Image (tube, rainbow, N blue to C red):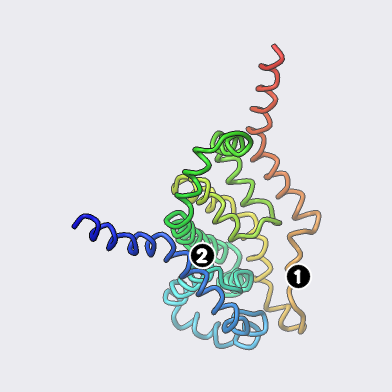
Amino acid sequence: MTDMTEANEQPKSAVARYGPIALIATVALVGAFFLRDYLSFDALRDNREALIAFRDSNYALTVLAFIAAYVVIVAFSLPGAAIATLTGGFLFGTALGATFNVIGATIGAVLIFQAARMGLGKQLKERMDASEGMVSKIKKGIDENQWSMLFFIRLVPAVPFFVANLIPAFLGVPLWKFAVSTFLGIIPGSLVYTSVGAGLGEVFARGETPNLGIIFEPHILLPILGLCALSLLPVIIKAVTGKKDLLK
């Protein structure tokens, strides 16, 4: 009887373990194929008047629908996160748009973080905790400097957003630390792209496309790199202090 019970439970545990990740991967692939034309700059340009008219008639509903759409885009790693950020600025202005963008992105990131942790995250964490040598040292270093590393991967523009969502899940980072660091860490980049979106009216009028590479221009990139350096300062200080202690 016990053997039959265990046999019945095994498929359920496998589904619970791999189901969330499999669902996200499937939706991401389907979305990348079917939604790429809808989540694009051309689609925003062609439907801008209808979006503005709907916003003016249903402001609260537009805000809720926008945040919900942003959550889905991030949670399922769909194409169009940059376009969604621009849309936030275009519809709501820089301040409110950035607020709604950050809220939607954070909720979506938390959902994919939880799905990853429910799946492979627990297994990987257990293996890394039980490992020895270099892997163990790396894991220990990250555990001792979680805040610094979390803010660093959020602030560096070169780190893809979905990668910054998955790595902490695989390393066993607590949910509340992930949520706080995500919310605060994506504010600088979100403000930059939202401000670009707020000026889309003039871009549309000139028949141009927005410069999404603006975040890599020196006057934008250097302050963000400064924040990255600040986020790593505790790690550097701890490393220097540790070396001094070894030399004594």
- Considering depth in this image, is 199 or 245 the residue closer to the camera? 245
> Taking 118 as reference, is 140 left or right?
right
Residue at position x 64%, y 88% in the image: 46
- Considering depth in this image, is 81 or 11 the residue closer to the camera? 11
Please state the horizontal and vertical placement of residue 91, each as a whole percent of the image: 57, 75
Q: Residues within 10 Å of mark 2 (few under 14, many from 20)?
A: many
**Quadrant hosting residue 141:** top right
**Quadrant hosting residue 245:** top right
In the rendered structure, are the residues bearing label 2 and label 1 in contact, judged by CB atoms less than 8 Å apart? no
Q: Which mark is residue 173?
A: none
Vertical arrangement, residue 63 with respect to residue 228, above or below: below
Residue holding disc 1: 211
Q: Secondary structure at mark 2?
A: helix
* Quadrant of the drawing holding the C terminus: top right
Residue type at tag 1: Asn
Vertical arrangement, residue 69 with respect to residue 15, above or below: below
- Judged from this view, the residue extending furthest toward the right is 218
Vertical arrangement, residue 47 with respect to residue 2, above or below: below
Marker count (numbered): 2
- Considering depth in this image, is 13 or 176 the residue closer to the camera? 13
Residue at position x 70%, y 25% in the image: 240
Please state the horizontal and vertical placement of residue 170, each as a whole percent of the image: 52, 50
Residue at position x 60%, y 46% in the image: 151
- Considering depth in this image, is 19 or 89 the residue closer to the camera? 19
Residue holding disc 2: 100
Q: Residues within 10 Å of mark 1 (few under 14, many from 20)?
A: few
Residue type at tag 2: Phe
**Quadrant hosting residue 219:** bottom right
- Judged from this view, the residue extending furthest toward the left is 1
* Quadrant of the drawing holding the N terminus: bottom left
